[in-house]
């Protein structure tokens, strides 16, 4: 026979055990749920990129920009949907550019000697998976005995990126054509800067080689501060004649965009692909002195 006096003691022990169990669970569950939320958020971000589209930006960062300015401008084009950004201009601090990017983004810088212009590429690792990357010399220094001029010394980086949702692969490169290339009155080259024009021709040839050597399943994509005004490029000697037409590249200026007219900053995409440039937006309220152009690629077949 159970003593009535023992019941309260047993009940007290059970209540104490229950309370201690609840306290342990209260400590552990938030930790587990927080980790789960972070993992779920990362998984969601990986699958949130639409399967039938992607966005590519070109952004010329002004020399001497600091982290807050770069972070602002990068944030604007990412807010416009960009998951790949091609930068132009020489960047003296890889650390500063890395600090300006979100944590989920990877930065690809050319290795080897620093050129007059280095053209890094950044991409969102939650949207793209890196297949391969390598550095390229786009044009070397050219010493002209008659004038003592030195043409641009340009390095770039090539990135083969696979879209995590669609499986589409792009071969991306960013480059910066020399300044003062364009005679806007004639529509052709500015031969007063012959060294720069010839450097541009060498760059166009090497860009063509990069496209020609790409596997058939890779779409060639380029981001450029071309320094040639699109709607006044009327000869076969500059961007249209040496790059976009012979390489069969579509640009943001060959589609109906929402940007403020035609300019010198291009996103280029191979036409013979499942994805084509559908529209673009130019963002002008930036710290840098160039617009950030975001081109939207959509599945066309």
Image: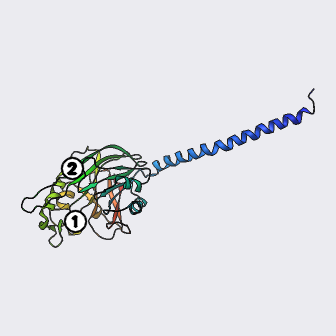
Left or right of 63 on screen, residue 128: right
- Position of 208 with respect to 8 (left or right) is left
SS for callout 2: strand
Q: CA distance from mark 1 to mark 2?
A: 21 Å
x%, y% of residue 220?
27, 50
Q: Nearer the viewer, residue 56 or 296?
A: 56
Viewer can see residue 270: no
> Which structural element holds mark 1?
loop
- In this rendering, the answer to whether 275 lies above or below 180 is above
- Residue farthest toward the bottom in the current orientation of the protein: 185
Q: How is the image coloured?
A: rainbow
Q: Earlier in the sequence, mark 1 or mark 2?
A: 2
**Residue drawn at the location 9% of the way across and 59% of the way down:** 144
Residue at 19% of width from left, 51% of height from top?
A: 206
Taking the image as shown, residue 33 lies to the left or right of residue 230, namely: right
* Rendered residue at 21%/64% (across/down): 179
Quadrant in the picture for residue 213: top left
**Which label is found at residue 154?**
none
State the residue position of label 1.
Answer: 228
Disc 2 crowd, CA 10 A, few/some/many (<14, 14-19, 20+): some
The furthest residue to the top: 1
Total numbered circles:
2
* Vertical order, 100 against 216 (above or below): below
Q: Position of residue 189 (x, y in %)?
A: 14, 65
Residue pointed to by mark 2? 137
Q: Position of residue 224 (x, y in %)?
A: 27, 59
Q: Residues within 10 Å of mark 1 (few under 14, many from 20)?
A: many
Which-is-in-front pick, marks 1 and 2? 2
């Amino acid at each position: 026979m159970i003593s009535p006096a023992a019941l309260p003691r047993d009940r007290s022990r059970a209540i104490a055990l229950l309370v201690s169990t609840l306290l342990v669970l209260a400590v552990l569950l938030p930790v587990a749920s927080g980790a789960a939320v972070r993992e779920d958020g990362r998984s969601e971000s990986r699958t949130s990129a639409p399967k039938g589209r992607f966005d590519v930006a070109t952004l010329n960062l002004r020399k001497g920009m600091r982290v807050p300015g770069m972070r602002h401008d990068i944030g604007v084009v990412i807010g416009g949907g960009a998951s790949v950004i091609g930068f132009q201009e020489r960047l003296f601090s890889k650390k500063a550019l890395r600090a300006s990017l979100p944590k989920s983004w990877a930065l690809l810088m050319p290795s080897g000697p620093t050129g007059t212009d280095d053209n890094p590429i950044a991409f969102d690792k939650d949207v793209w998976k890196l297949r391969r990357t390598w550095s390229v010399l786009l044009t070397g220094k050219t010493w002209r005995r008659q004038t003592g001029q030195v043409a641009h010394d340009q390095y770039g980086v090539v990135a083969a990126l696979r879209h995590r949702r669609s499986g589409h692969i792009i071969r991306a490169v960013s480059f910066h054509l020399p300044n003062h290339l364009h005679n806007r009155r004639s529509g052709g080259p500015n031969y007063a800067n012959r060294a720069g024009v010839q450097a541009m021709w060498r760059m166009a040839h090497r860009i063509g080689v990069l496209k020609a050597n790409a596997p058939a399943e890779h779409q060639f994509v380029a981001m450029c501060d071309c320094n040639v005004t699109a709607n006044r490029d009327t000869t076969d000697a500059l961007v249209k004649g040496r790059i976009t037409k012979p390489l069969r590249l579509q640009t943001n200026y060959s589609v109906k965009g929402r940007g403020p007219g035609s300019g010198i900053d291009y996103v280029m995409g191979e036409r013979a692909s499942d994805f084509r440039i559908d529209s673009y937006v130019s963002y002008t309220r930036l710290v840098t002195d160039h617009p950030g152009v975001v081109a939207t690629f959509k599945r066309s077949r």
